[in-house]
Amino acid sequence: MLGAKPLVDQRVAILLDELGIDYETDADGDYQALLEIKADRFQQVVIRSRTHTLDELEVRKIYSVAYQTSQPLSQQVANLLLGINHSSKLGAWQLMESGGEYFAAYNAHVSADTDAQTLMTVLEAVVESADSIEDYLTGRDFF
């Protein structure tokens, strides 16, 4: 529908409030939060409001950007991330493109009806994975 506002899934807000995590919603209706990794590092995470279903399973995507470039990923960076995917317990690296920029983001899917503790476990896995690669590749704390 033209001009319709994106739907914000209130199930996410309830869980984030229960966890005491501050957040904002963006123009797409997605939740964004800035989590502290350690005393001097922070990492932004996005929790999608939009969900996908596979048979009776409803899931949502959670991701955190770790690396940005104006060119497709170098072979070295792509191979590094693919190698990490092999040993990841939860989630995987993906390449996203927007406006001519390329982003490496760590993402995981979680049940749309998850509980607060499971959401926190997934959030921690996503932001810690993203932050470690951001630090390794750039030495900065940009995302």
Image (tube, rainbow, N blue to C red):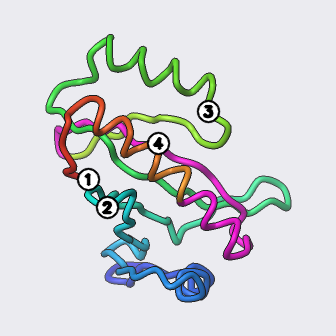
What SS does tag 2 mark? loop
Evaluate if marks 4 and 3 touch, with contact meaning CB atoms under 8 Å apart.
Answer: yes
What SS does tag 4 mark? helix
Distance from the alpha carbon under mark 2 to that under mark 1? 15 Å
| Amino acid bearing label 2 | Ala
Distance from the alpha carbon under mark 3 to that under mark 2? 25 Å
What SS does tag 1 mark? loop
Residue annotated with mark 2: 39
Q: Earlier in the sequence, mark 4 or mark 3?
A: 3
Tell whether position 57 is magenta.
no
- Toward the front, the furthest residue is 39
What SS does tag 3 mark? loop
62 lies above or below 49: above
Per the rendering, the mark at residue 129 is 4
Residue annotated with mark 1: 143
Question: In front: mark 2 or mark 1?
Answer: 2
Instruction: Report the residue at 38% width, 34% height from top.
Output: 95
Q: Earlier in the sequence, mark 2 or mark 4?
A: 2
Give the x, y percent position of residue 6: 42, 79
139 lies above or below 82: below
- Looking at the image, which is closer to me, 11 or 87? 87
User: What is the crowding at mark 2: few (fewer than 14 residues within 10 Å), some, or many (at least 20)?
Assistant: few
User: What is the crowding at mark 3: few (fewer than 14 residues within 10 Å), some, or many (at least 20)?
Assistant: few
| Amino acid bearing label 3 | Ser
| Left/right of residue 13 with respect to residue 65 in the rendered view | right
Question: In front: mark 2 or mark 4?
Answer: 2
Distance from the alpha carbon under mark 3 to that under mark 1? 21 Å
